[in-house]
Each structure stands twice: as C-alpha cells, then as structure tokens.
Amino acid sequence: MEESHHLLRPLLNQSTTTAAPPPKDDHVVDNLKPISSNSSIILRLTLVACIGIVSIWANHEASKGYDITIVNESGDTFLGKRFELFYVSNDEAVRLVIRASKVVENFLYPDHDSHIKKPISHIIVKLADRNLTDDIFVESTTDHKFVLNISPSVMEGTSFRQVVFQAVKRGVARISLWDGRGNAPQNLKDGIVEYMIGHLWATRPPSGHDKAKPLRSAARCWKHADSRVVAEFLDYCERRRPGFIRRLNHAMMDGWDDGKLDGLLGQPAQTLCTTYESLRYNISSV
C-alpha cells in the first residue's frame, strides 16, 4: 500500500494549494466533548475489566500447574550434547511434557474435576547416564513428584525426535494414571497406557498383531504380559461402554480389587473375556 501511495505522487499537481479546513461549529464541538469523555471512560473501564479477567485466569491456570525440570545426566557425551541442544537449551522438553499432559488429562479428566484428578507437583525429565531396559522408566518420589528417566538410546538415529516424544507421551500417561494405591495389576496399567498412546495420538500396532492367536485362558485378556493385547481388550470394552477407561481410572483412585472391573463392565470380566476371545478367534480365522 505504501509503494502505491508514492507512485501516485507524480500525478498530482504540485502547485495546487491545500484547501483550508471549513470553520468549526462551536456548538458541534461542545456536543462532542461529553461523548469523547464518556468513550474514554468506557474504554478504560473495559481495559481494567479485561486485565482483571486475565489475572484471574492466569492465577487459576497457575494454581493447577506443576514444576518441570530437565536434567541431563549424559553430560558431554555425543547423545548428551544432542539432548542439550534439541531439548534443554530451547525448553523443547518442557513443551513436550505440557503438550502430552494436556492431551492425556483432557481424556482422563474431561471435566477437570480437581477432586478426582491425580495430584502432580513436579515432573523431572532426566536423560539417564546409561541405557535403560525400556525407553522410559517412571519413578515417583515424595510430595507427588515424578521422574521420567529416559534412556540415552532414544537419542540415536535420525528419527530421535519421534522416539523422544513417544517416550515422553508414555511417561506422562503413566504419571497421570491412578494406580489403585499400588495394588492395581501392572499389566492392566500398562494396557491402559498403551490404549491411550494408540488412540489419543492415532498410532497403530505393528502389522500382523491384530491376527494374534487366541489366549489359552480367557481370564488373562486383561492380565496379559503383552500390553498391546490388553489395550485391544480395553478398546473392546470402551466401544461397548463409552467412557469405560475414564471410569476405570477413577475406580483405581481409592485402591483396587478385581471386583471393581466386574462392576464397571456390568458382568464378570472373565465372561466378557470369553466373548472377546471368541470374536478374535473368528476374525483371525477368516
């Protein structure tokens, strides 16, 4: 727009005298003064109200937040320097935790009910000084503090960004999940995490996994060692009773016994496992 304005200048008559403005009507000016004054007051009040609303919102957001700390125990190693460059110096690791937390919490606690939401005061993301058995290992300390121990091996290769985010998502999902005060079956918790990873971020199990052989014992469909098998059963339960996973997480808030699963399913878990395994067998036989 500015360039067009300058291009038009040569077409104007440079000798043209600028016309004098028309005389002001004192009566009109006097009438405009109160309007201008009132507009200024309204604008200021609106600004103050907006600041107040933003302040209240910011305090509300801060009150439900938690601290995030990034630790690099791999130091001056190649993988440690890569982690420092891509995740520490630019706060990318912090942003990954926040992104993953938002998705997981919106799923587990859609109403943001502070009464049932698992309290978290501090998350520490730590790149370990040695390779771990798994990409991510979660441990809890006192006062609702949690440590996401990440294996340095995730920083290898050219696709390390996807691998790191996958590890963070899995760790955050595990942290946000209730555990029945330590009594919920580990296989069930692993299956819930696997379910969330697969459905909240639309990932899929490896090819051929859907045609797995039926289990020898139907009662093990939610206690299977393979978390993907458990996740598939939980998906079946979720489709039968939408909101099942959220209710299951809530049920694990105050402890655990197998009867809670029966109640949530509306029938004995073993009975539903038998039905589920029969469907899997028929599908895999096609």
Image (spheres, rainbow, N blue to C red):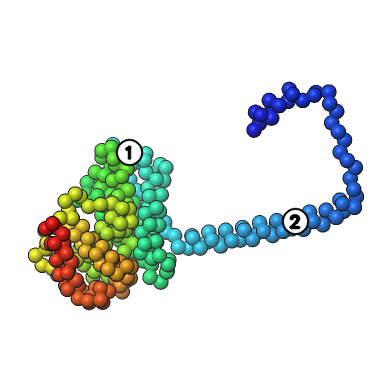
Secondary-structure class at tag 1:
helix
In the foreground, 67 or 234: 234
**Where residue 138 is drawn, which disc sits there?**
none
Amino acid marked by disc 2:
Ser
Kindly give the residue lying farthest to the left in the view shown.
Answer: 216
In the foreground, 197 or 129: 197
**At 71% from the left edge and 26% from the top edge, which residue is drawn?**
8
Kindly give the residue lying farthest to the front in the view shown.
Answer: 286
**At 42% from the left edge and 67% from the top edge, which residue is drawn?**
111
Q: Quadrant of the C terminus?
A: bottom left
Name the residue that disc number 1 marks. Answer: 82
**Where residue 39 is drawn, which disc sits there?**
2
User: Measured along the vertical axis of the image, is residue 276 above or below residue 198?
Assistant: below
Horizontal relation, residue 107 to residue 189: left or right = right
Where is residue 49? Give x, y as percent.
Answer: 64, 61
Secondary-structure class at tag 2:
helix
In space, the residues marked 2 and 1 are separated at their CA atoms by 56 Å
User: Measured along the vertical axis of the image, is residue 154 above or below residue 147?
Assistant: above
